[in-house]
Amino acid sequence: MFLKCLDIVGFKSFADKTHIDFADGITSLLGPNGCGKSNIVDSIKWVLGEQSTKTLRAGRMEDVIFNGTDKRKPLQYAEVALTIDNSERNLPTDLTEVEIKRRVFRSGESEYYINKNRCLLKNIRELFFDTGVGKSAYSILEQGKIDQILSQRPEDRRYIFEEAAGISRFKMECNEASKKIERTDENINQAESLMKVEK
Ligand code: ATP
């Protein structure tokens, strides 16, 4: 699986529609300080579902929208689309190419799409479970991240191994099932209390 291309509009410093093709092999981003190299990495994290404004180097989520310059008005929304080659079927879908897209408006409203079909953030996260790609996965190793991986708490480090071993999906499903059982138990207790009152 590799990233094929990235389309950005209105995300941080990228006011104009920007298309980046990633060739097979290694792609390097070069440019002077402040030209937007890290913003490209931020846009990939964002489209993969990152919700932490700190990780995105923004104060509020709205700050990822192009906020204007002396010569240009701020934009009203930011949009990032990432196209992934899935010919090896690493993603759990039969499609050879998968496009995920995220859009956010100044109102705070967010939209998510998989291959142009509106979906939930949860669906995007599920698509990438156990692939090593995803908001908390190990596919993006920034400056200092290797030190962090080596020195962070053992529980956090285990998360990386669980993702690589392919069990994150099952853990998530297990957590969801536990929550459902809890809710069902609560409902049963409530129903039993009502039945007692009626007797
Ligand atoms: P360095 O080499 O110093 O790490 P860089 O190329 O990685 O720099 P970035 O951090 O990606 O640069 O980009 C910083 C630029 O992005 C700054 O000029 C900042 O003003 C601009 N920027 C960030 N958010 C927005 C926004 N919402 N609207 C417009 N510009 C923004």
Image: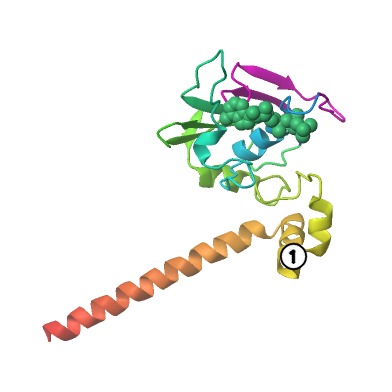
- Quadrant of the rendered image holding ligand 1: top right
Please tell me which residue is depicted at 69% across the width and 52% down the height of the picture. 130
Query: Which quadrant, please, contains the C terminus?
Result: bottom left
Residue 176: horizontal and vertical position, in percent?
Answer: 50, 62
| Whether residue 139 is situated above or below residue 95 in the rendered picture | below
- Left of 87 or right of it: where is 124? left
| Whether residue 134 is situated above or below residue 161 in the rendered picture | above
The segment highlighted magenta reads 2-31
Residue 189: horizontal and vertical position, in percent?
Answer: 30, 79
* Label 1 element class: helix
Residue at numbered disc 1: 158
Q: Is mark 1 within 8 Å of ligand 1?
A: no
Residue 47: horizontal and vertical position, in percent?
Answer: 60, 36
- The residue sitting at the right extreme is 25
Foreground: 102 or 65? Answer: 65
Foreground: 77 or 71? Answer: 71
Please tell me which residue is depicted at 18% across the width and 86% down the height of the picture. 196
| Whether residue 69 is situated above or below residue 142 in the rendered picture | above
Q: Is residue 12 magenta?
A: yes
Q: Main secondary structure of the magenta part?
A: loop
Residue 85 makes an appearance in the image: no
Foreground: 71 or 66? Answer: 71
Please tell me which residue is depicted at 78% across the width and 25% down the height of the picture. 22
Please tell me which residue is depicted at 67% across the width and 51% down the height of the picture. 136
- Left of 169 or right of it: where is 164? right
The amino acid marked with disc number 1 is Arg
Q: Quadrant of residue 8?
A: top right
Q: Quadrant of residue 86?
A: top right
Query: Which quadrant, please, contains the N terminus?
Result: top right
- Left of 119 or right of it: where is 100? right
Residue 191: horizontal and vertical position, in percent?
Answer: 24, 76
Residue 141 makes an appearance in the image: yes
